[in-house]
Amino acid sequence: MENSTESETLIDHASIGITEADKRMNSALSLKEYYTVYIIETKIDSETWAETKGMQKLSLATRRYTDFVTLHNHLGDKYPWVVIPPLPEKKQSFMWNSEAVSDTMDPDFVDRRRAGLESFLKRIAGHSEIGYDECFLKFLGECDNWMDLSKSHNNILKDTELTIKTMNASLRGRNSDKRFEEIKTYSNKLQGSINKILTYRAKQAERLYNVDMIHLHYGRIFSELSAVDNDIGDAVQRTGHYMDSIASAISPALEDEEVIMDQLKEYLAFTNSLHTFVKNHDLLHYNLNQLNNMSNSKETSGIMSRLFGYTAAAADRDTAAIEAFENKKIEAKANYSEFVDKSLENYKQFERQKDSDLMNILKDYVAFQTKYAQKGLQTWKNILQSIQSID
């Protein structure tokens, strides 16, 4: 493993953006099937620096969502000690309109997903280690065989052929590192809190939408009234228009609010990254415990063999096997120790970024609500003036 340190990152030299989400049709099928491709534009500030990284100063890459999934999985396998940035959702969740159908081709949703994928790339590029991964650099460039590189790395978890289910309580209760237990507990609490916020927000948004849309009927009534009574016609008609504006403003406002909620959803997905991050530690820790248990078992077996006698050839085989096993145990200890050091350092970086991001999300939300409330207040002041002018 290489040490991950606070150093110069790719994002310091590159401007990365997804300029377009293009809808295309798969003509190879008898049935029409549409899919979305994303145009990634990468600009390097120095041609000399770009050459040292095997990149072009300006490159355009066309990638599908499945390509981003492959990249995400590759980084997770190769860098298990890193909290890998999550991908944006492929289908809408926490929808405020219960009657709406989750349409993956909805233009507003596609654009928000484009922004989420762009954030994913920038977060990777802002990391001092995974930002320089060869597969990632090829992904950004005009390279069609970038996926071949995702299969050629060594994974320190490759010898641990088990899952969290097989470890169960035996892992948790035996000399588990409390720091990772705390990370898991925190990620569970963060996940629960964000889930509650998004669920409550969806319910409140639907209520607000239904209330504001009622003003569409008010606007129609006032417009009809203006045609009946000429004396108050102008004032009532203006009032009706203001009522209409309340109804017409709510959908764009909720779409703007959805952009802020997408940032919260990103951190909801980050909690899954934390769970994987802790699971990777648990796998290594469990593997090390198993090796230690096997070592104790072999020592007991060796004592029994010496008590009951064995041949010189058997002794030589046992010596060679013990030496190979001890080397494997030493390697496992080194991998585990290095993993712990690197993962905790990466977690500190994640914590700093998370605190900053969540504070910015809160600021954006307060600014949005303030702006929307001020706009609504001005509309109601205009309605009051229209009604008062009748006198």
Image (tube, rainbow, N blue to C red):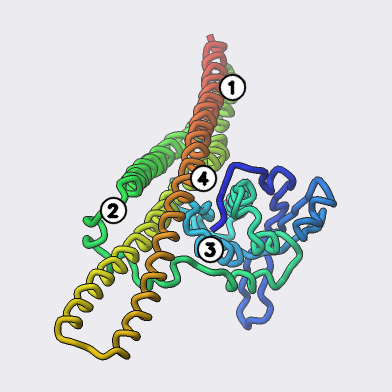
At a point 77% along the width and 60% down the height, the residue shown is 54
Residue at label 3? 78
The reply to whether the C-beta atoms of the residues labelled 3 and 4 are less than 8 Å apart is no
**Measured Cα–Cα span from mark 4 to mark 2:** 35 Å
* Residue sticking out furthest to the left: 308
Residue under the point 18% across and 87% down:
309
State the residue position of label 1.
233
Q: Nearer the viewer, mark 1 or mark 2?
A: 2
Disc 3/disc 4 C-alpha distance (Å): 27 Å
Q: Is residue 135 left or right of 203 when viewed as pictured?
A: right
Q: Does residue 114 appear in this view?
A: no
**Upstream in sequence: badge 1 or badge 2:** 2
Towards the viewer: 116 or 388: 116
Residue type at mark 1: give it: Gly
**In the rendered structure, which disc, 3 or 4, sits on the residue that comes first in sequence?**
3
Q: Tell me which amino acid carries mark 3.
A: Lys
Image marks 3 and 2: residues in contact by CB distance under 8 Å: no
Q: Nearer the viewer, mark 3 or mark 2?
A: 2
